[in-house]
């Protein structure tokens, strides 16, 4: 996304939509309109158009097709984007003893960890939340 030259520009010039997401009150003032740079690795506060507030590096947000960590499911917000909220039918199939230390409110459909849920045959199987959402999980015992 963007040429080498683009990344040397200020965030405001290179990625104006991303620049507009910089949180208006939680970041220190920038020394000029030429800062921050689009390639900056500094972690700052952001607020997306859906009013999700989060911290991430400038480079990470500027290089992402879906820059909001909450909207993209890369940051869990219980009651907003967690599996229990977005897919309650999957949360009902959660196997607590096979998901130690986790609940369906701790993961999103985009989480990359494997979770264990029950299948229609009543057996349990591990898969990523995305695979469960797609519903293409074969039972390891039934085949």
Image (tube, helix red, strand yellow):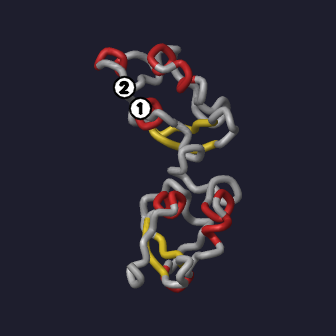
Q: Residues within 10 Å of mark 2 (few under 14, many from 20)?
A: few
Residue in front for this viewpoint, 61 or 24: 61
Q: Are marks 2 and 1 in contact (CB under 8 Å)?
A: yes
Q: CA distance from mark 2 to mark 1?
A: 6 Å
Residue in front for this viewpoint, 36 or 18: 18
Which SS class for mark 2? loop
Name the residue located 58 percent from the left edge and 30 percent from the top edge: 22
Seen in the picture, residue 24 relative to 133 is either above or below; the reply is above
Which SS class for mark 1? loop
Residue 1 bears which disc, if any?
2
Seen in the picture, residue 51 relative to 104 is either above or below; the reply is above
Left/right of residue 47 with respect to residue 99 in the rendered view: right
Residue under pointer 1: 63
Residue 83 percent location from the top left of the image: 61, 62
Which residue sits furthest front? 143
Residue 136 percent location from the top left of the image: 46, 63
Left/right of residue 18 with respect to residue 38 in the rendered view: right
Q: Quadrant of the C terminus?
A: bottom left
Quadrant of the image occupied by residue 23: top right
Residue 61 percent location from the top left of the image: 47, 35
Name the residue located 51 percent from the left edge and 63 percent from the top edge: 135
Name the residue located 56 percent from the left edge and 77 percent from the top edge: 120
Name the residue located 43 percent from the left edge and 59 percent from the top edge: 112
């Amino acid at each position: 996304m963007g040429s080498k030259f683009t990344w040397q520009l200020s965030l405001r010039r290179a990625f104006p939509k991303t620049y507009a997401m910089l949180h208006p009150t939680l970041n220190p003032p920038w020394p000029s309109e030429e800062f921050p740079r689009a390639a900056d690795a500094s972690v700052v506060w952001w607020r997306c158009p859906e009013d999700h507030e989060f911290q991430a590096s400038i480079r990470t947000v500027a290089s992402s097709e879906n820059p909001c960590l909450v909207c993209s499911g890369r940051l869990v917000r219980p009651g907003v984007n967690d599996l229990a909220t977005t897919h309650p039918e999957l949360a009902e199939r959660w196997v607590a003893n096979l998901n130690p230390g986790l609940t369906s409110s701790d993961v999103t459909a985009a989480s990359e960890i494997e979770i264990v849920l029950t299948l229609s045959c009543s057996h349990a199987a591990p898969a990523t939340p995305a695979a469960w959402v797609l519903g293409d999980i074969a039972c390891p015992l039934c085949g």
